Structure formats: structure tokens, C-alpha cells
Amino acid sequence: MLYRLVSALLKGEKEFSRELEEVIQEVGIDLREFSRRCGIPYSTLYKIVRGERSPTLSTLRRILSAFRREENFIAVIAARHILEETAPFREKIAVRSYPATNFEEALVMAVRAEKDGAMAIVCAPVLSTTIQKMVDIPVFTMKPKDSILKAVRQAVEKVSLS
């Protein structure tokens, strides 16, 4: 899909508009949902799809990045020094780091991880109950010391069995 959009863009704005509309329909979502996913106001996206407006560079990046999702990854929400411990799992399954230094940032990162397509989230116990209420993907708890490895391992095993 990404290739089709880039090819259409090279052919011109009208071709891009037509192809974008087709690709969104193929994905099986409506224009309003797509605008939410890529963070572009609905009215702007509507005008682009109808060929009434040219996308800016930043709008174009958002549109294309909405189709460039990394599949099969687990999100780990933690402080940067804890995130460095996830390296051993990056060969078996993608582990994407979402750094957060406070509760509010962690909640924002949880929503972002789900939006990015995470299969599961690993986070601290103080966050897990709130995040479970916010997202529709499995949430695993890590406890202090060495347990981040255990929590990521459990998430990998659980997701692999699904």
C-alpha cells in the first residue's frame, strides 16, 4: 500500500488523491477513522482525498506513516535506563521502547503504543491497572530488578501462542 501511494504521488496530486481514497477503503476504515489514526483533521483529509487541497509535507508524512506500521512488536513503557534491558528480546520479537518519566507521560505512551499497533504492553505495576482500562491489548506488569526480562518473556510467549 505504501508503495502504491508513493507511486501515485510521483504521478501527481490527483492520482495520489484517488489512490489514497482507494487504499483507505481497502483497509476497511472510513475517512474519519483514518484521520484519527494519522492525526490529521478530518476536513483537511477530506479535501486532500477529493483533490481540493494539496497535502503539505508534514501531512504527507503523517499519511504515509499511518501505513508503515511495524507488526508483531511489544511496547515497553519505562524510564530510559530500564528500557536498555530489553535488548536480549529484540532478536526474537520486536520490542519498541516508549520512554516515560512520569505517570502522565506513561499513559500517553500507552495510547501511542496501541495506536502504533503494539501486540502487548509491558509496564510498571503502578501503571498497569490504569493502562488496562485504557487499551484493548494485553498489559503485562514488570516488577523491580530483573523482572522486565521476565515480563517481556511472558508477553512474547503469550503473543506467540495467540
Image (cartoon, rainbow, N blue to C red):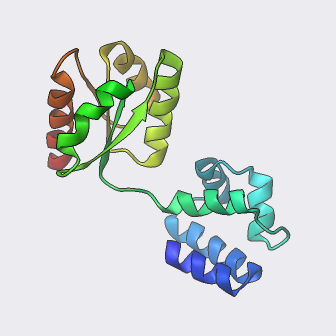
Which residue sits at x=65%, y=48%?
39
Q: Nearer the viewer, residue 68 or 22?
A: 68
Residue 136 shows in this picture: no
Residue 107 shows in this picture: yes
Q: Note whether 137 is above or below 51 in the view shown.
A: above
Q: Is residue 114 left or right of residue 124?
A: right
Which residue sits at x=15%, y=36%?
153
* Residue 116, position as x, y percentages in the image: 46, 47
Q: Note whether 113 is above or below 40 in the view shown.
A: above
Q: Note whether 54 is above or below 38 in the view shown.
A: below
Q: Nearer the viewer, residue 20 or 84?
A: 84
Q: Note whether 156 is above or below 42 in the view shown.
A: above
Please identify the quarter of the rendering in which residue 95 is found.
top left
Q: Is residue 108 left or right of residue 91?
A: right
Please identify the quarter of the rendering in which residue 78 is found.
top left
Please identify the quarter of the rendering in which residue 17 is found.
bottom right
* Residue 67, position as x, y percentages in the image: 51, 62
Which residue sits at x=32%, y=19%?
124
Q: How many numbered discs, if any?
A: 0
Which residue sits at x=44%, y=57%?
69
Q: Is residue 80 left or right of residue 116?
A: left
Q: Is residue 50 left or right of residue 127?
A: right
* Residue 27, position as x, y percentages in the image: 50, 65
* Residue 140, position as x, y percentages in the image: 26, 28
Q: Nearer the viewer, residue 51 or 133?
A: 51
Q: Nearer the viewer, residue 47 or 122?
A: 122
Farthest residue to the right: give it.
Answer: 52
